[in-house]
C-alpha cells in the first residue's frame, strides 16, 4: 500500500534523520554561505513567518501555522499562501515582490534556492527597502518637519485613491458589516497582543481603544455609506477580506489627511 507523502518540513519527519538546527536557522546559514560569508543576514520573527534580510533582498518563510482562519501545516498550503501574497501585493508594489522561490535540500542536507534536491518549503522573495526609505522612519526622524516627508505622504494618498476607486463595492448591509468588522478587530487584537509584541502593546492598546470609539460613532452611518459606495472590498493574504472606508468624491484629500494624522 502506498504510504502518504510526508511534508519534508514536518518536525516529525526531521526527527527521523539526524538532529539538525531549526529550519529558519538553516536558511540563515545558507544565505550567509551564498553571500560568500561577506554579509550579515538579519532575521526577524513574526507570528506566522520568519523574514531574512540580505543587503538586496528579503525572504519570507511561512511558519507551519494553524489557527481558526488558516492551516499552513502542509507544503502545498504554504505555497498557495505565498503565491496569493505575491499576487495581492503586486497591485501596489509590483516591483518589490519578485516571486516565490523553492527551498531545496540536497541528500547531504545542505539547502539551496531553486536548485537541485527535493523541495522542502517555499520563500517569498522581495526587494529589500532601506530604513531611510520607510515612510514611518522619515516621519519619526523629523516629526516636526512635514516639508521633508509631506511629498511622500501626498504621493501615497494619490496611489491609495486610485486603488480604492477601482476596488469593488461591498454588498453587505450595516449589521452584516459590523459583524465582519468586529470579528476582524478581534483577530487584530489576538495578533497584536501576542507575546512577540510586548514592547509595543501600550501603543497598540491606545490605538485599538481609539478605533473602537470611532467605530461606534460610524456604525450608525454604515447603511448610507455602503449605498454611496464608500465601503470597498480589499482582499489581503489569507481567508478573510478587509473593508475600507473611502469617499470617491473627496478621496485624495481625505486619505492625505488620514495618512498625515496617522
Image (spheres, rainbow, N blue to C red):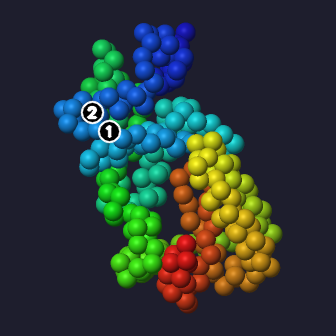
Residue 250, numbered label: none
Residue 130 versus residue 190 in the image, above or below: below
Q: The C terminus lies in which quarter of the figure?
A: bottom right
Tell me where residue 132 sits by quadrant: bottom left
Mark number for residue 41? Answer: 1
Please report whichever mark, 1 or 2, sits nearer to the chain's N-terminal start: 2
Q: Residue 172 vs residue 18: left or right?
A: right
Q: Is residue 46 left or right of residue 241?
A: left
Residue 215 is left or right of residue 254, and the answer is: right
Vertical order, 11 against 47 (above or below):
above
Q: Residue 23's spot in the image, x, y percent? A: 43, 27
The residue lying toward the viewer, choosing from 79 and 139, is 139
Q: In the rendered structure, are the residues bearing label 1 and label 2 in contact, judged by CB atoms less than 8 Å apart?
A: yes
Identify the residue at image location x=31%, y=26%.
111
Q: Residue at x 70, y 69 (%)?
A: 210
Is residue 30 shown above or below 246? above
Q: Residue at x 35, y 32 (%)?
A: 28
- Residue at the image point whose x is 69% and y is 42% from the top: 68
> Which residue lies under the disc numbered 2?
32
Return the x and y of residue 47 as percentages of the image width and height: 56, 42
Amino acid at each position: 500500500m502506498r504510504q502518504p507523502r510526508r511534508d519534508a518540513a514536518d518536525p516529525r519527519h526531521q526527527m527521523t534523520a539526524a538532529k539538525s538546527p531549526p529550519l529558519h536557522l538553516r536558511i540563515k546559514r545558507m544565505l550567509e554561505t551564498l553571500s560568500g560569508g561577506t554579509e550579515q543576514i538579519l532575521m526577524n520573527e513574526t507570528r506566522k513567518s520568519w523574514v531574512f534580510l540580505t543587503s538586496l533582498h528579503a525572504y519570507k518563510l511561512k511558519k507551519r501555522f494553524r489557527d481558526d482562519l488558516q492551516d499552513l501545516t502542509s507544503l502545498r498550503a504554504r505555497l498557495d499562501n505565498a503565491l496569493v501574497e505575491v499576487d495581492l501585493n503586486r497591485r501596489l508594489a509590483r516591483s518589490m515582490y519578485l516571486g516565490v522561490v523553492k527551498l531545496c535540500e540536497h541528500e547531504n542536507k545542505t539547502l539551496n534556492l531553486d536548485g537541485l534536491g527535493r523541495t522542502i518549503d517555499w520563500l517569498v522573495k522581495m526587494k529589500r527597502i532601506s530604513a531611510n526609505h520607510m515612510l514611518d522612519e522619515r516621519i519619526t526622524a523629523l516629526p516636526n518637519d512635514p516639508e521633508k516627508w509631506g511629498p511622500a505622504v501626498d504621493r501615497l494618498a494619490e496611489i491609495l485613491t486610485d486603488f480604492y476607486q477601482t476596488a469593488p463595492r461591498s454588498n453587505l448591509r450595516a449589521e452584516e458589516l459590523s459583524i465582519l468588522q468586529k470579528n476582524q478587530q478581534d483577530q487584530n487584537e489576538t495578533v497584536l497582543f501576542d507575546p512577540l509584541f510586548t514592547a509595543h502593546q501600550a501603543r497598540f492598546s491606545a490605538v485599538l481603544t481609539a478605533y473602537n470609539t470611532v467605530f461606534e460613532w460610524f456604525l450608525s452611518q454604515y447603511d448610507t455609506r455602503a449605498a454611496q459606495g464608500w465601503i470597498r472590498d480589499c482582499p489581503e493574504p489569507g481567508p478573510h477580506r478587509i473593508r475600507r472606508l473611502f469617499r470617491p468624491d473627496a478621496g485624495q484629500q481625505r486619505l492625505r489627511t488620514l495618512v498625515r494624522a496617522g
